[in-house]
Image (cartoon, coloured by chain):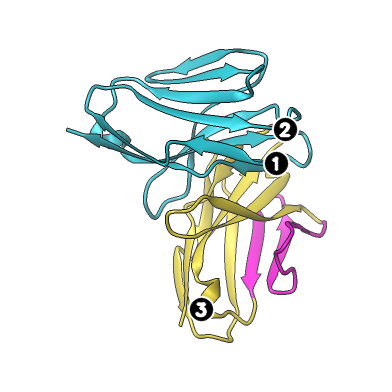
């Protein structure tokens, strides 16, 4: 019940295309859903996050779509660029201790 | 944005020795710090949660006597890997949180045990 399932495991997108990564959770106590970007050998960096009271949040080229009834959320990267090539992790947080449960990660490669 | 540093960025040690990793929040007071472990091509695995001045809470399966965590102040937490063995080789990442949900991650420490 604490799991966050992320798909796909890897993704190849052409430059200028849309990258879409999906996550699903079971525990309805989760109320904070961030996305992190990680480059090789570096720590994760927060990209964008959403709370369950909204269905969509957009920041620049990054959009989170959230479906509370389906317990799913996704990250859309518009106009994908080679510099976006990285591993992306979704996560879910609950009020209990502020812990984050991470998805398995998606390795994104944007081809020029 | 909030900045978290880790030191060292990489360390090589011999089997049986201990290694200390520092995590500092540079521009904010971290009420909670988290320690993660990450193997190549895998996700982040939470090891423990620490609050300033109190004992760390370890996740199931993490040996508290092997991975000693000290959260001495609102800006500093340390992870000591005691009697390190090759299987402890990994990428260790800390994060720091304030009163919100957001966690700010450090750059990570690559530990290699020979």
Instruction: Judge if badges 1 and 3 mark residues of a common chain.
Output: no
Q: Would you say A23 lies left or right of B79 here?
A: left
The image position of residue B18, as x and y in percent, is 60, 80
The image position of residue B41, as x and y in percent, is 42, 54
Label 1 SS: loop
**Among the 4 quarters of the image, the one containing residue A112:** top left
Instruction: Judge if badges 2 and 3 mark residues of a common chain.
Output: no
Name chain A's colour: cyan
Name the residue carrying label 1.
Answer: A2
C-alpha span from label 2 to label 1: 6 Å
Residue found farthest to the left: A112
User: Mark 2 touching mark 1, by CB under 8 A?
Assistant: yes
Q: Quadrant of the N terminus of chain A?
A: top right
Camera sees residue B76 = yes
Q: Which residues are magenta?
A: B54-81
Is B109 located above or below residue A15 in the figure?
A: below
Q: Residue at x 67, y 14 (%)?
A: A53
Instruction: Judge if badges 2 and 1 mark residues of a common chain.
Output: yes
Name the residue carrying label 3.
Answer: B86
Count every numbered label the image shows and give the total. 3
């Amino acid at each position: 019940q604490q799991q966050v399932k992320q798909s796909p495991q890897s993704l190849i997108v052409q430059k200028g295309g849309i990258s879409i990564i999906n996550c699903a959770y079971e525990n309805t106590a989760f109320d904070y859903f961030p996305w992190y970007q990680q480059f090789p050998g570096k720590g994760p960096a927060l990209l964008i996050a959403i709370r369950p009271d909204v269905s969509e949040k957009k920041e620049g080229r990054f959009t989170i779509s959230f479906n509370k009834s389906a317990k799913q959320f996704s990250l859309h990267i518009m106009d994908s660029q080679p510099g976006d090539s990285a591993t992306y992790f979704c996560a879910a947080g609950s009020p209990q201790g502020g812990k984050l449960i991470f998805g398995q990660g998606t390795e994104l490669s944007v081809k020029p | 944005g909030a900045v978290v540093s880790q030191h060292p960025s990489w360390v090589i040690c011999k089997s049986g020795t201990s290694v200390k990793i520092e995590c500092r929040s540079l521009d904010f007071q971290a009420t909670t710090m988290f320690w993660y472990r990450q193997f190549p091509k895998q996700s982040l695995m939470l090891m423990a949660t620490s609050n300033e001045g109190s004992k760390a809470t370890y996740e199931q399966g993490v040996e508290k006597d092997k991975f000693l965590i000290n959260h001495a102040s609102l800006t500093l937490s340390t992870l000591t890997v005691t009697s390190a063995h090759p299987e402890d080789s990994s990428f260790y990442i800390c994060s720091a949180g304030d009163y919100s949900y957001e966690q700010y991650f450090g750059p990570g420490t690559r530990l290699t045990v020979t």
